[in-house]
Amino acid sequence: MLSGAVAKATNYMSDILYFFTNPLVLLLLVIWSVIWKGLALWRAARLNKPIWFGIILVVNTLGILEIVYLVATRKHFEEFKNNKQANSN
């Protein structure tokens, strides 16, 4: 019974490894990550948040940290844009 479960787990891990070593999947993950990282780095720079900029630059989470940062700073960024537009008029 136990050997059957081990065999299933081994097959499952083999499938996961095959999926993540597929060049197309890797390319899509890199593109996904670069887009989110770029957006989050741009926002951190615009909001003058050097600590967040450094964390986002160094930590690679496949976009998870970047998306959380973008959502968390959305309101602050909107205020920043509104203040900038008001000052330019």
Image (tube, rainbow, N blue to C red):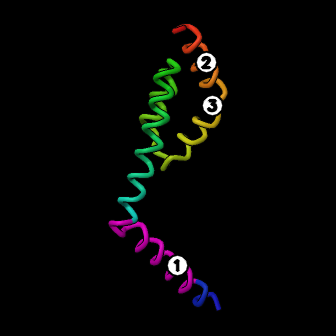
Q: Disc 2 on helix, strand or loop?
A: helix
Q: Is residue 1 left or right of residue 41?
A: right
Disc 3 designates what residue? 74
The C terminus lies in which quarter of the figure?
A: top right
- Residue type at the position of mark 3: Arg
Instruction: Kindly report which numbered mark, 3 or 1, lies closer to the viewer in this rendering.
Output: 3
Q: Is residue 70 left or right of residue 24?
A: right
Q: Position of residue 65 (x, y in %)?
A: 55, 41
Characterize the local packing of mark 2: few (<14), some (14-19) or many (20 or more) Cα atoms within 10 angstroms: few
Disc 2 designates what residue? 82
Range of residues picked out in magenta:
6-24
Q: Disc 1 on helix, strand or loop?
A: helix
Structural distance between the alpha carbons of marks 3 and 2 = 12 Å
Q: Residue at x 50, y 28 (%)?
A: 43
Looking at the image, is 6 positioned above or below residue 52? Answer: below
The N terminus lies in which quarter of the figure?
A: bottom right
